Image (cartoon, rainbow, N blue to C red):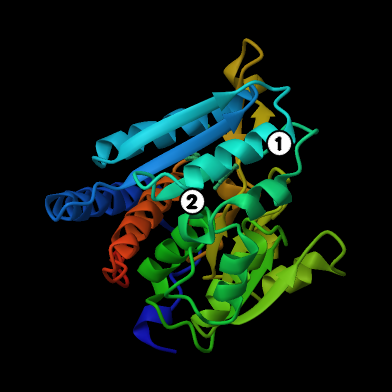
């Protein structure tokens, strides 16, 4: 085992600071965007939100703020809850043809009358900064990574893993708990592309605890508050918590709530070598990587190579 892969001693998990890493990515994007604009292309992003989901409204506002801070041209389309599929598809079609827009994103989840996979399928793959279009998913799985837009949450999680292990994960076992198209599956593809040995576990996996205990890198993305307990974690493992669950917090009084991940963080830090907190771990990386994907799209639209941010190994 190389020095980079050596686990920390029990009880001393390093905190992987997603907020700080996201700031570094955003600074880097801002600098590259300004160079691109000086060369004649200002990156443009369009965010579409349908309905009034409170969390979605917060995320969309954060995306618009980040885009403006990066110097992008940014527009947000807010559509009513009862929007018809045809109207949403018409808007996507219009944005596909707008040369000032390099990245299009439709905030999920969508109201029940709308078919998310048809809407995602209507976004031009060259403007699909979420990386959810089947063509980009296929490119990711078939190793055509340089042309693919990689979904933002897994791409951000990989940058956090890179800080602990570097880019080469050969010899390490990774377990991804969760098999969504947005996180679990692309996460597995990225870990595999970095040469980790990858297992994807889910609600029907037999003896999930034992499967998790094999992991040198454990990624939790199931949306079940504190599902992963301390004794599910291999001592010294790197634990990446993608879950963002709002739970009641009686200790705060006044019926208040708080965010927790899919991992019991207090227990995990006693066992893991490194771990992401919630909030402040993977979450902030999602928006930073969205800005990086928009920058990449704008660069590609004028035939330039895709600019890439490198996190650097063992910088924690
Ligand atoms: N079209 C998309 N829809 C959704 C995506 C997505 O990537 N594309 N992901 C999530 C929501 N999301 C971005 O859209 C998102 C979630 C969480 C965070 C974040 O920064 N979380 C913070 C806590 C924020 C809080 O206090 O509520 C953290 O974890 O520290 C950013 C973006 C679903 N929909």
Question: Residues at badges 1 and 2 in contact (C-beta under 8 Å)?
Answer: no
Q: Taking 2 as reference, is 198 above or below it?
A: above
Whole-angstrom CA distance, mark 1 to mark 2, is 34 Å
Residue at 51% from the left image edge and 40% from the top image edge:
94
Count of labels in the image: 2
Mark 1 vs 2, N-terminal side? 1
Using the image, tell me which numbered label, if any, was put on residue 86.
1
Q: Is mark 1 within 8 Å of ligand 1?
A: no
**Could you say which is closer to the camera, residue 141 or residue 315?**
141
Q: Quadrant of residue 200?
A: bottom right
Quick one: quadrant of the N terminus? bottom left
Left-right relation of 138 to 167: right
Q: Is mark 2 within 8 Å of ligand 1?
A: yes
Using the image, tell me which numbered label, if any, was put on residue 282.
2
Q: Quadrant of residue 160?
A: bottom left
Residue 86 image point, x, y percent? 71, 36
Residue 260 image point, x, y percent? 60, 39
Circle 2 packing at 10 Å, graded few (<14), some (14-19), many (20+), is many
Kind of element beneath mark 2 = helix
Circle 1 packing at 10 Å, graded few (<14), some (14-19), many (20+), is few
Residue at 44% from the left image edge and 39% from the top image edge:
46
Q: Say whether residue 95 is visible.
A: yes
Quick one: quadrant of the C terminus? bottom left
Residue 177 image point, x, y percent? 70, 62
């Amino acid at each position: 085992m190389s020095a980079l892969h050596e686990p920390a001693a029990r009880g001393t998990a390093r905190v992987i600071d997603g907020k700080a890493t996201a700031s570094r990515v955003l600074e880097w994007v801002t600098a590259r965007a300004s160079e691109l604009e000086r060369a004649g292309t200002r990156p443009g992003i369009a965010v579409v939100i349908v309905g009034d989901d409170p969390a979605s409204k917060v995320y969309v506002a954060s995306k618009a703020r980040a885009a403006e801070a990066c110097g992008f041209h940014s527009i947000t389309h807010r559509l009513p809850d009862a929007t018809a599929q045809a109207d949403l598809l018409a808007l996507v079609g219009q944005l596909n043809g707008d040369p000032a827009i390099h990245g299009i994103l439709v905030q999920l989840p969508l109201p029940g009358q709308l078919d998310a996979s048809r809407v995602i399928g209507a976004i031009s793959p060259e403007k699909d900064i979420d990386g959810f279009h089947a063509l980009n998913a296929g490119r990711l799985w078939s190793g055509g990574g340089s042309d693919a837009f990689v979904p933002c949450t897994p791409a951000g999680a990989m940058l956090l893993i890179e800080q602990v292990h570097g880019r080469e994960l050969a010899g390490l076992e990774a377990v991804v708990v969760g098999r969504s198209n947005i996180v679990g599956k692309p996460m597995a593809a990225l870990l595999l592309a970095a040469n980790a040995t990858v297992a994807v576990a889910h609600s029907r996996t037999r003896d999930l605890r034992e499967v998790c205990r094999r992991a040198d890198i454990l990624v939790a993305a199931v949306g079940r508050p504190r599902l992963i307990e301390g004794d599910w974690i291999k001592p010294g493992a790197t634990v990446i918590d993608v879950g963002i669950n709002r739970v009641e917090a009686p200790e705060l009084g006044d019926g208040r709530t708080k965010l927790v991940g899919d991992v019991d963080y207090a227990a995990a830090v006693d066992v893991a070598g490194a771990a992401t907190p919630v909030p402040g771990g993977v979450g902030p990386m999602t928006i930073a990587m969205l800005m990086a994907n928009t920058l990449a799209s704008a660069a590609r639209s004028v035939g330039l190579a895709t600019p890439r941010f490198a996190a650097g190994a063992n910088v924690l």
